[in-house]
Image: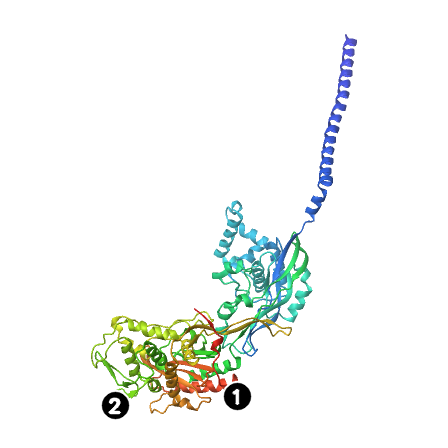
Amino acid sequence: MKNFFSRVTQHRASRSKTSTTAQIPFRMNFLFIIVGLLFAALIAQLAYLQILHGTQLKAEVSRTDSTVETNNVQRGMIFDSTGRVLVGNKTHQAISYTKGVNVMAPDMYRIANRLGKYLTVPTGSLTRRNRADYFLASSKRAKQVQTNIPGIKNAAQSDAYDKELQYLYAHPADFQLTKQQKNDAMIYARMSGAYSLSTTYIKETGVTSKELAEVGEHLGEMPGVKVGTSWTRDYPYGSSLKSILGTVSSEKIGLPDNKVNQYLAQGYSRNDSVGQSYLEEQYESVLRGSKSQTDVEVSGTKIMKEVKRYGGQKGDNLQLTINAGFQKKLQSLVRQAESGAGGVSTGTYAVVMNPNNGSIIGMAGVDRNPSTQKITNNALGAINNSITMGSVVKGAMVSGALMDGVITPTNNTLTDMPITVGGTKKASWFNKNGGQNMAVNASTALEVSSNSYMMQLAMKEAGFKYSEGAALTMNPSIFSKMRGYFNQFGLGVKTRIDLPGETTGIQGSTSKAHIGNALDEAFGNYDAYTTIQVAQYMSTIANGGYRIQPHILSSIRGTNKNGGLGTVKDSVTPTVLNHIDMTPAQRKLVTEGLYDVVHGTNTWKTGGELDTIKPEISAKTGTAQTYYKGTETVTLSLASYAPSTHPQVVVALAMPNLDYNAEDNNMKLAKSIYQAYWSSVQSTSTLKSGSTTTNTATAGN
């Protein structure tokens, strides 16, 4: 039995050994098969990648994005009529930043902190949001904030950031910045304002030599930071004309909110400087120039290659009709006149223009605060301050009556006498009580500035027969009739000067209850007009009846190699808005009256103080009884042209709310203006007899 069990045991052991030995090769073979299959798959994938698609994938790995980077160029300059610079460009050393592709906040944060070591920027405009953005740009500080906000890990990225901001706003003590950090935060804020491959100024003025040297030395450590130049507007002849020339937004302000989409559609960047007002805004498309263009190849976040494709072109220049030297004198004279006005005077305004082509040679104005006596420059007051001018408009009243046929060149004599209607008496300044009743014709009525004559013309135009003391029952349509004639000369309508902001003046009520004011309207003591309207009105008389659109722009010109005015690209031609349908005999009656205002022989002529001006001028003075905050005042005005025979220049001015007893301030100012004109703009030796140049004008609507 023992041997039996021994054999059995040996037999089982032998079988077990044989079975184990058989299983080991099978497992090994299975593993080898699996490994072989994996190697085969790997080889197949490598073959797929390298043989079939190797070229394509290699190109993908080394692919770069190509785009275009643009940079601003110098803005066009503005010159006066003689070629002197009114608005130029002042060049500054500047530090700028061009944001690369896929540059994230942490990247800019590091660059800002590095740049802040070498560059100091003003931090006065640093906002709470700027400080918070900078604070959270540090991942370490952001994590500290997040630990204080429950559930922030489950919030969307934008919501999480909003919660972080709200936490900081609620705990301002937690994110106090040092002086250096505020400097870096301001740099970071300006960098953040740029979008991919756009350039923004970090510091555009006031960069010191030390800052330039240190920043330049470390440019390699600050991707996107560059040393370059910037430009700001410069005013060699002072800022008195700035209200007309307009302003340009700074790079910090960028595009105006109300026009941002319009400008973006035209290829502007959000931080571009643009014209904000008047000429700078109106001719933005001319002055802006065309940006430089640089082809940029980017791989990842790195700029690999830059090739300038187009160097850009400086903006075209504007040449104005204004004479800078004369303009400076004109502004000074207007300011001096206002300084001596006293009382409750609210300003003085003057316009000097060429009546034959509408060119504005000078336009000046000042506002005055009667409470503080402070005087401020406001040349635009000449186009947007509506003033009751007084008798200066009587030339238009006489012209309207002639065109209406109520008087003729051979039948125009009336008696100057007080006019009494409905218990109210109105009279001429020299005949208040009827002691100076006299016969006057149309020319003499202008010479002595007869209110009575003008009121009688109004009644005749209305078909009303005057009877002393009787009620005034004229039809209110007389207002529109008189205004229609005034409008033909430019009074009460826009002159269409090439500046935005012009007003039409102020019209009084035309109801039956105000019918008595129709008589005031006839001699200029009801409606209000602007000084530029008075200048256009007198120009229309001076040039033979052509209402010409005033303009400040003379031409658009390129830039020569010396940086000055280049070739003319476009020029302004005179535009006739309408022609006054008057006969030569009718015009002569009016122009003789304006001449006699200064040179006549009547005792009551109103402009005798002007008869010393050479060459001789024709004029109409104006005095209106006005009120300022309950105080009785007087407004003085004047419209004139010279020489009387062949007019070359028109001078119009207004001085509202002077002391009630003021008399000749307007004529004193006019004399000074003419003296400045003949010495600064045009020599009297150049005057030639002959017809005016209105035949070069083109018809307008």
Residue 548 coordinates in the image, percent (x, y)? 45, 74
Which amino acid type corresponds to the residue marked 2 in the rendered image?
A: Gly
Q: Nearer the viewer, residue 495 or 204?
A: 495
Q: Rounded to the nearest whole Å, what is the CA distance between mark 1 and mark 2?
A: 47 Å
Report the colour scheme: rainbow
Q: Residue furthest top?
A: 1
Does residue 21 appear in this view?
Answer: yes
Mark 2 residue element: loop
Mark 1 residue element: helix
Residue 507 coordinates in the image, percent (x, y)? 34, 72
Q: Which of 635 and 414 is in front in this view?
A: 414
- Residue at the spot 50% in from the left edge and 59% down from the top edge: 262
Which label's residue is closer to the chain start, 1 or 2?
2
In the image, residue 132 sits, relative to residue 496, either above or below, namely above
Q: Nearer the viewer, residue 205 or 597?
A: 597
Residue 497 coordinates in the image, percent (x, y)? 45, 72
Image-quadrant location for residue 644: bottom left
* Mark 1 lies on residue: 685
Which amino acid type corresponds to the residue marked 1 in the rendered image?
A: Ser
Pointer 1: residues within 10 angstroms few (<14), some, or many (20+)?
few
Q: Nearer the viewer, residue 154 or 669?
A: 669
Q: Which of marks 1 and 2 is in front?
A: 1
Image-quadrant location for residue 590: bottom left
The mark found on residue 435 in the picture is 2
